[in-house]
């Protein structure tokens, strides 16, 4: 399980969608656009890395004897 | 009806058919009887049902329905058949078109289940409003499955292939037999003590008897109160157990459950690449828009000839200064002529000018002008100022 402090995959993905939406559809200063662009790209790299490194952990929970 | 008014055979059969087809009481009814003359054809199976009084009704199970019968019927079986009466116009016969058959005894169980289902439904256990949403990105999924079952293997394979970011907790349980309901209930309660995001209850297909554990009332009620969103995949498409009605989402296979529980990483990866492209395109657009704006601005007259705005002001200043200098010289001119006229007036009053015209001016020795004889005495020295010099003389007398 991910640490509580770190944002979940879903939260990061939501943020990424927000950024793409903002950069595509709102009027931004060049500085703000660049900031969002960099944040978005960092999120993409981060999410790709999560997927690449992910490995399903399987645990069998049987009745306590 | 008169003799000369008559039906054709077909018309009469058609009328009978429409009467029977229109009668709700003859549709979806249960009939108990013993099978005899069971015969198979490519289209389906034909047989008779006979009761104790030797009454007979012809029956048919069409091939599509036959495939889903819970057992292989044979002559002599005591059964309960569910079906509808239908008429064959061409042969003037009616028969019972069977949808499904239960061995007698199991039929009673089916009816009991039907009654239980109605009760739970009336209590709201199947209400759509009570269904929980299945989270889109689960971090852990619990499986209630038969230990080492095909369903377990299928779920693990598909979940880890689709969404490896999610952990799997397996709660093995018996899934058929008399102890299965109790075992399933224990597994469900164990699952409820863990922090899983989704629970999947799955079992492969089987006979109604095999699936009966999933029709257990206590299990259904426990699942209803379960706070974890639950997907059920019990049996095949046509087998719907109580668990399927109570669960938040019902699918027909373990693979379907894995698909409903997880996002597909292939799609997410594609979406990430899509986002990357979208960001690149958007940032390029922003840059080119700003560049266009800059180009537009620099093409404006002000930037082409920044002094143009000043030229006008400069000209105005020049105009003003010109006007100022002109009016100034006018004033000077006016003053000058005034000064000249005054100075000539003044000049006219200058005694020197009188002297110049041939007069003289007499003063005493100190230069005081003598204008009366009372100012002088005999013997005083006088000075007379003439046009071209001064005469000094002595007063010898005055009169």
Image (spheres, coloured by chain):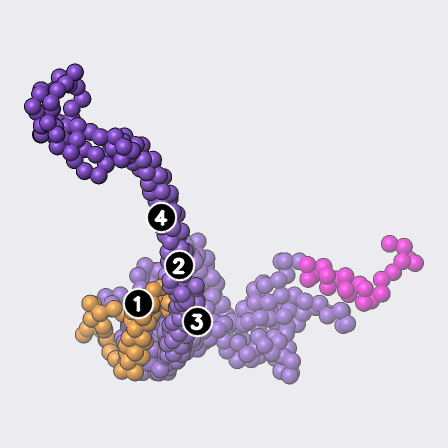
* Distance from the alpha carbon under mark 3 to that under mark 2: 82 Å
Q: Nearer the viewer, residue A36 or B311?
A: B311
Point 29% across, 33% down: residue:
B357
> Mark 2 Cα within 10 Å, few/some/many (few <14, many 20+)?
few
Chain label for disc 1: A
Residue A42's tag is none
Quadrant location, the C terminus of chain B = top left
**Residue of label 2:** B311
In this rendering, does residue A31 appear at all?
Answer: yes
* Distance from the alpha carbon under mark 1 to that under mark 3: 49 Å
Q: Is residue B5 magenta?
A: yes
- Which tag is nearer the camera, tag 3 or tag 2? 2
**Residue of label 4:** B325
**Residue of label 3:** B251
Residue A31's tag is 1
* Distance from the alpha carbon under mark 2 to that under mark 1: 37 Å
Same chain letter for marks 4 and 2? yes
Chain letter matching colour orange:
A
Same chain letter for marks 1 and 3? no
> Mark 3 Cα within 10 Å, few/some/many (few <14, many 20+)?
many
Point 46% across, 68% down: residue:
B240
């Amino acid at each position: 399980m991910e640490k509580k402090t770190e944002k979940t995959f879903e939260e990061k993905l939501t943020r990424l969608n927000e950024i793409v939406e903002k950069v595509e559809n709102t009027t931004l200063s060049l500085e703000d656009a660049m900031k969002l662009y960099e944040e978005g790209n960092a999120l993409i790299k981060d999410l790709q890395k999560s997927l690449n490194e992910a490995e399903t952990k399987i645990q069998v929970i049987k009745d306590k004897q | 009806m008169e003799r000369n008014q008559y039906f054709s055979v077909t018309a009469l059969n058609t009328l009978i058919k429409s009467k029977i087809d229109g009668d709700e009481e003859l549709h979806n009814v249960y009939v108990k009887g013993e099978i005899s003359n069971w015969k198979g054809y490519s289209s389906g199976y034909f047989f008779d049902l006979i009761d104790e009084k030797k009454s007979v009704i012809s029956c048919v199970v069409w091939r599509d329905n036959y495939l889903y019968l819970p057992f292989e019927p044979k002559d002599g079986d005591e059964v309960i058949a569910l079906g509808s009466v239908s008429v064959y116009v061409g042969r003037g016969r009616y028969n019972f078109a069977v949808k499904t058959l239960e061995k007698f005894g199991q039929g009673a169980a089916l009816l009991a289940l039907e009654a239980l289902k109605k009760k739970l439904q009336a209590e709201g256990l199947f209400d759509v409003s009570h269904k929980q949403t299945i989270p889109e990105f689960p971090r852990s999924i619990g499986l209630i499955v038969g230990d080492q079952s095909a369903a377990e293997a299928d779920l693990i394979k598909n979940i880890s292939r689709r969404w490896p970011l999610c952990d799997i907790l397996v709660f093995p349980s018996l899934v058929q037999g008399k102890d299965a309901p109790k075992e399933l209930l224990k597994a469900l309660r164990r699952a409820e003590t863990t922090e899983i995001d989704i629970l999947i209850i799955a079992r492969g297909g089987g006979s109604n008897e095999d699936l009966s554990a999933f029709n257990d009332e206590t299990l259904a009620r426990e699942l209803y109160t379960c706070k974890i969103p639950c997907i059920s995949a019990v049996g095949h498409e046509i087998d719907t157990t109580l668990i399927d009605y109570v669960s938040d989402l019902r699918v027909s296979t373990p693979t379907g459950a894995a698909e409903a529980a997880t996002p597909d990483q292939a799609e997410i990866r594609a979406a990430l690449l899509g986002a990357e492209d979208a960001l690149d395109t958007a940032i390029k657009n922003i840059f080119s828009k700003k560049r266009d704006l800059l180009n537009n601005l620099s093409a404006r007259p002000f930037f082409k000839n920044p002094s143009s705005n000043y030229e006008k002001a400069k000209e105005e200043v020049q105009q003003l200064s010109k006007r100022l200098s002109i009016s100034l010289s006018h004033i000077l001119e006016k003053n000058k002529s005034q000064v000249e006229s005054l100075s000539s007036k003044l000049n006219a009053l200058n005694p020197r000018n009188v002297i110049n015209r041939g007069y003289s001016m007499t003063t005493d020795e100190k230069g005081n002008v003598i204008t009366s004889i009372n100012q002088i005495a005999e013997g005083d020295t006088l000075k007379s100022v003439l046009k071209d010099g001064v005469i000094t003389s002595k007063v010898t007398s005055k009169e």
